[in-house]
Image (spheres, rainbow, N blue to C red):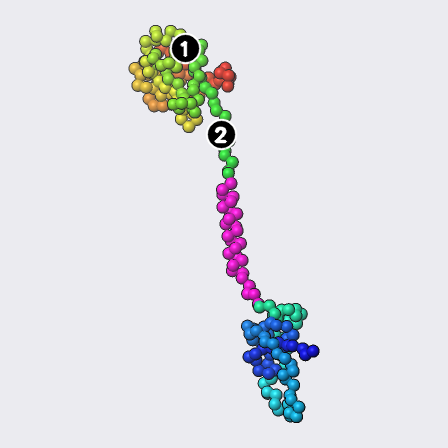
Amino acid sequence: MATVIYRCPVGAPGECPSSATRGYCQVHMFQQLERHDPAEDVPPAGAPAATPADTPVDAAPVDASSAGPRSAIDPEAATRPARPAQPQQNRHRQQDQQQQGQQYQDRRPQPRPARPPAVRLALLVAGVLLPVRAEHRRGGGGLAIGRDEPDCAAIPGLAGLDQLSRHHARLRWIDGALYVEDLRSTNGTFVDGRRIEEPTRIGPGRRLRFALDLDVQVVEIDEFGAPR
């Protein structure tokens, strides 16, 4: 049975090495080898044998070690087309993965800073505690002071305090702090003995006076409404 070989169809005789498997020429890298029957190379009977003079002068044996990256160590290397390296694409892919990871971290819920515990304050008026409504309550919380204010209805003898205006002052929260504001009363509002002209911050231990009739102390209370 005759052995079939594959050789380059464009190379000169002896220029390109043949192969026992179909693949690509080692000299012409992108030229596919074609099937060839060695019986065709046998001269017919009576034909003169080839002499050294018939061999081309520039024909030289090809060294397999200089045939490029496909070496004889891997017999199947000649049948596989070379795959160009893609370092640029790999670098871009890594950058995209890093960006996606950063975006995922940005979307994760961040812990909120802990809010300080809410301070509960009240006014101590003639032995009566008037709690100041919390800031989150309807209308912003706070407390209204005056003879006609429902917040002061529990104060004994309120109707007889003629120096106190009907709508005298107001306590309100601003950014978690309590302020007292005079509502253009006739006899004024005082903090620690000094008359105020604009909203003034107050806290536990401060003493207020509304007109000449109503002395008040600011105290802190617990969650049950009792003074601390």
Where 155 sits versus 115, above or below?
above
Query: Total of numbered circles in the picture?
Result: 2
Indicate the secondary structure of the residue bearing disc 1: loop
> Where is residue 207 drawn, in percent x and y?
42, 16
From the top left corner, tell me how far across and down residue 18 is, in percent.
63, 77
Give the residue at x 64% y 77%. Answer: 5
- 92 relative to 41, above or below: above
Place of residue 98 in the rendered image (x, y in percent of width and height, measured from the top left): 52, 50
Furthest residue in direction front, as rendered: 1
Provide the residue designation for mark 1. 154
Give me the C-alpha separation between circle 2 and circle 1.
33 Å
Q: Is residue 17 in sight in this rendering?
A: no
Residue closer to the observer: 160 or 223 = 223
Three-letter code, disc 1: Ala
- The N terminus: image quadrant: bottom right
Camera sees residue 159: yes
Magenta segment, principal secondary structure? helix
Q: Which residues are magenta?
A: 82-108
**Tag 2: residue type?**
Arg
Q: Which residue in the rendered view is the most extreme toward the right?
A: 1
Magenta stretch: includes residue 198 = no
Mark 2 — residue?
Answer: 115
| Left or right: 227 as drawn, with respect to 16 | left
Report if residue 100 lies within the magenta region.
yes
Dividing the picture into quadrants, the one containing residue 132 is top left
Q: Residues within 10 Å of mark 2 (few under 14, many from 20)?
A: few
Q: Nearer the viewer, residue 90 or 72?
A: 72
Tag 2 secondary structure: loop
Is tag 2's residue or tag 1's residue first in the polypeptide sequence?
Answer: 2
Task: Looking at the picture, tell me which residue is in the foreground, 159 or 49.
Answer: 49
Residue that appears at 47% across and 22% down: 119
Q: Any mark on residue 91, and which? A: none
